Image (spheres, grey):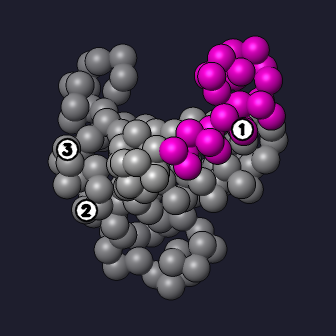
Amino acid sequence: MARTCCSLHAYSEAEDYYGRAYSILSDSLGAEHSLVLDTMTDHAGVLIALSRFTHAEQVYRTVLDMRWEYVHMPPCVRAGCQLMADCTIVSAAIREKQSGPDDPGVATALTNMGQLLQRQGRFAQAEPLLRRAVKIQEHHHGDTHLQA
């Protein structure tokens, strides 16, 4: 129903449906399940359509945190001052356990966050995310595929 609302540009209604879907899915499948993370990602897209960029960024950060573990992360990044800038990033969390470090779901999460940061003019923060997403897509599809 949420996707139908989105196709009709009824984003406020879609937001309500995504909230309910999140509650149902996380209660039945667990908060770390890939369907829950996908629902959160879709919800963040609705928040962007509603120009609620700060909230969308928080949702994307949560999804990324659940999909990734950051190694050698500076305190400023842990505090949320910047996202993955100058960090060594190692895939380790949920999606890696389920599908490996180069899972396309991780690439999608990185792309979504990178595009949000670009939209806000935060290009230096967006670039490493988008570069990593491209590497994952190239690994998964090959460097000549349209997804890469």
Q: Quadrant of the C terminus?
A: top left
| Residue type of the residue flagged with mark 3 | Ser
As helix, strand or loop, the secondary structure at mark 3 comes to helix
The residue located at (26%, 32%) in the rendering is 138
Q: Give the Cα separation between the discs numbered 1 and 2.
A: 30 Å
Q: What crowding class fits label 2: few (fewer than 14 Cα within 10 Å), some (14-19), or many (20 or more)?
A: some
Query: Residue 104: where, in percent of width, then height?
Result: 31, 36
Q: Give the Cα separation between the discs numbered 1 and 3.
A: 29 Å
Q: What crowding class fits label 3: few (fewer than 14 Cα within 10 Å), some (14-19), or many (20 or more)?
A: few
Per the rendering, the mark at residue 92 is 2
Decide if residue 130 is in sight here.
Answer: no
Between discs 1 and 3, the one toward the N terminus: 1
On screen, 19 above or below 145? Answer: below
Front residue of 103/122: it is: 103
As helix, strand or loop, the secondary structure at mark 1 comes to helix
Q: Which residue is mark 1?
A: 15
As helix, strand or loop, the secondary structure at mark 2 comes to loop
The residue located at (52%, 59%) in the rendering is 62
C-beta proximity under 8 Å, tags 1 and 2:
no
Q: Which residue is mark 3?
A: 99
Between discs 1 and 2, the one toward the N terminus: 1
| Residue type of the residue flagged with mark 1 | Glu
Query: Residue 107: where, in percent of width, then height?
Result: 38, 41
Number of the front mark, 1 or 2: 1
